[in-house]
Image: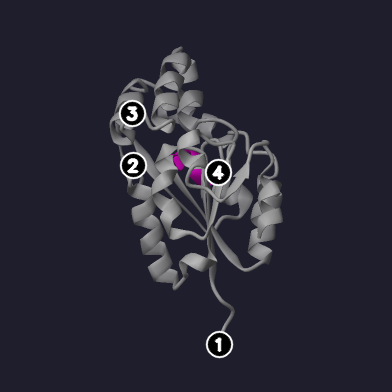
Amino acid sequence: MGKMMKLAVFDFDSTLMDGETIDFLAKPLGLEEKVAKITEEAMSGRLDFFESLIERVALLKGLENSLAVDICKNLPLMPGAMETVAKLKEKGYKVVCFSGGFRIGTTPAKEKLGLDADFSNILHHKNGILTGLVGGDMMFGFSKGDMIQRVQAMLGVSKENTLVAGDGANDVSMFPYADKRVAFCAKDILKKEANIIVDTKDLTQILEHI
C-alpha cells in the first residue's frame, strides 16, 4: 500500500490572502467601501452568496482587464501562508485553494505558494474591459462542499485525512467533509462549525493541530 493520500483545502480571500480580492479591484473605481459592505454581509451569512457575488461583480463593469490582472498579481499573502503550505506538502498533503473570488487572483498565488490546484471564478471581459459578468466553479454557497466531494473521490481521500480552512459563510459547505475544520480569523457562522479556531493572522498556527 502506498502512503495514505491527504487533502488540505484553503479558502483564498482572508485565508491564504490578506484581504478580499474584490475590494482591491473596486478601489480604482472608488467603490471599495460599497463593495466591502456587501462582502461583509455575504461572509457573515446574511446575504445569499450567489446574489452578492453577481451584485459585487456588476459594480466592476468598465474596469480595464489588464489593470485587474495587475492588481491581482500583487495581492498580499497571509502571514505564514508560504510556510504552512510547504509544511503540509512535506507531510504528504495535496494542497488546493477553493475561492468564491477569481482565477486572476488565485492562479498567481497558486504559483507563488506551490499549490496543487486552484478552483475559482472567471471575470468576463470583452475588448479588454470587464463587463460586470462572472462565471465559474465557485458561484454558489454550496459550491465548495460540492467540489470537495468531487476532489476527495478523484484522489481517494477520506474525510479523516482532509483538512479545510476558511473564514466566511461560503466555507461552511465544505466543513462536513473534513475531520480537521479550521476557522481562521473567521465569522461566527463558521466558528460554530469548526474544531480548530485560529484568531491571529498567522497561518502557521494551524500546524500545531496536524
Question: Could you tell whether 204 is left or right of 28 in the image?
Answer: right
Cα distance between the residues tagged 2 and 4? 17 Å
Badges 4 and 3: C-beta atoms under 8 Å apart? no
Asked if the magenta segment contains residue 7, the reply would be: no
Cα distance between the residues tagged 4 and 3? 20 Å
Residue 1: assigned label:
1
Question: Could you tell whether 52 is left or right of 158 in the image?
Answer: left
Q: What residue is rendered at 46% in x and 12% in y? A: 30
Instruction: Return the residue at label 3.
Output: 47
Rendered view: 56 above or below 100: above
Q: What residue is rendered at 55% in x and 35% in y? A: 14
Bounds of the magenta segment: 101-107
Whichever of callouts 1 and 3 sits on the residue coming sooner in the sequence is: 1
Asked if the magenta segment contains residue 103, the reply would be: yes
Whichever of callouts 4 and 3 sits on the residue coming sooner in the sequence is: 3
Instruction: Return the residue at label 4.
Output: 183
Whichever of callouts 4 and 1 sits on the residue coming sooner in the sequence is: 1
